[in-house]
């Protein structure tokens, strides 16, 4: 997996300076995402041009802590979780990326936050049910 996602912790009062710096330094074709909830610690994420970036909808982004040697077990659980979500209305796809800080990062594309919420209500939180610690947050294009 290539390093195709990077997270940024930006205090709310520093948005303008961060956005100006990111725009000046980002690789051509990179996509900047902003967390929907302002209390999200990593309020911004940047996808490299190599990452598949949807033109609309929202992205549920989940950095996972996967212990050394557990990659195969984690990826098997991720695939089973992805299959369960894939049959629900509003699901538009999922991918596994690798972050610049060496984490597995799951990305699930939804048509809207409402469709994800309906899926959780019907199915339960299948991401939280994985036997690995994850920190999900919903993002949109910045």
Image (cartoon, helix red, strand yellow):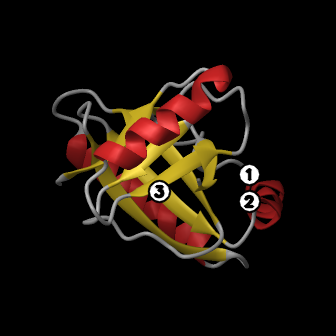
Please state which of residues 103 and 28 is positioned toward the viewer in this rendering.
Answer: 28
Q: Secondary structure at mark 3?
A: strand
As drawn, is 68 to the left or to the right of 29? left
Residue at the (44%, 31%) spot, across then down: 8
Is residue 135 visible to us here? Answer: no
Q: CA distance from mark 1 to mark 3?
A: 18 Å
User: Which of the two marks, 1 or 3, is nearer to us in this view?
Assistant: 3
Q: CA distance from mark 2 to mark 3?
A: 18 Å
As drawn, is 83 to the left or to the right of 25? right
Whether residue 86 is situated above or below residue 99 in the rendered picture:
below
Q: Secondary structure at mark 2?
A: helix
Residue at the (45%, 62%) spot, across then down: 80
Give x and y (percent) for residue 88: 69, 75
Q: CA distance from mark 1 to mark 2?
A: 4 Å
Q: Secondary structure at mark 1?
A: loop
- Please identify the quarter of the rendering in which residue 141 is found: bottom right
Please state which of residues 74 and 94 is positioned toward the viewer in this rendering.
Answer: 94
First in sequence, mark 1 or 3: give its number.
3
Marks 1 and 2: CB-CB under 8 Å?
yes
Give x and y (percent) for residue 45: 46, 43
As drawn, is 120 to the left or to the right of 79? right
- Residue indicated by mark 3: 107
Residue at the (66%, 21%) spot, across then down: 13
- Residue indicated by mark 2: 123
Give x and y (percent) for residue 130: 50, 42
Please state which of residues 7 and 120 is positioned toward the viewer in this rendering.
Answer: 7
Label 3 packing within 10 angstroms: few (<14), some (14-19), many (20+): many
Residue at the (76%, 59%) spot, across then down: 113
Is residue 7 visible to us here? Answer: yes
- Residue indicated by mark 1: 124
């Amino acid at each position: 997996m290539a390093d195709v996602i990077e997270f940024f912790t930006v205090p709310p009062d520093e948005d303008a300076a961060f956005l100006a710096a990111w725009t000046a330094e980002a690789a051509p074709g990179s996509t900047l995402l902003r967390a929907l909830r302002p209390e999200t610690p990593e309020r911004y994420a940047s996808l490299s041009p190599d990452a598949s970036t949807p033109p609309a909808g929202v992205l549920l982004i989940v950095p996972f802590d996967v212990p050394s040697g557990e990659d195969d077990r984690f990826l098997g659980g991720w695939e089973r979780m992805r299959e369960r979500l894939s049959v629900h209305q509003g699901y538009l796809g999922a991918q596994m990326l690798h972050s610049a800080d060496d984490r597995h990062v799951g990305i699930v594309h939804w048509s809207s936050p409402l469709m994800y919420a309906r899926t959780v209500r019907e199915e339960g939180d299948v991401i939280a049910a994985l036997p690995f610690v994850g920190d999900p947050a919903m993002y949109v294009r910045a």
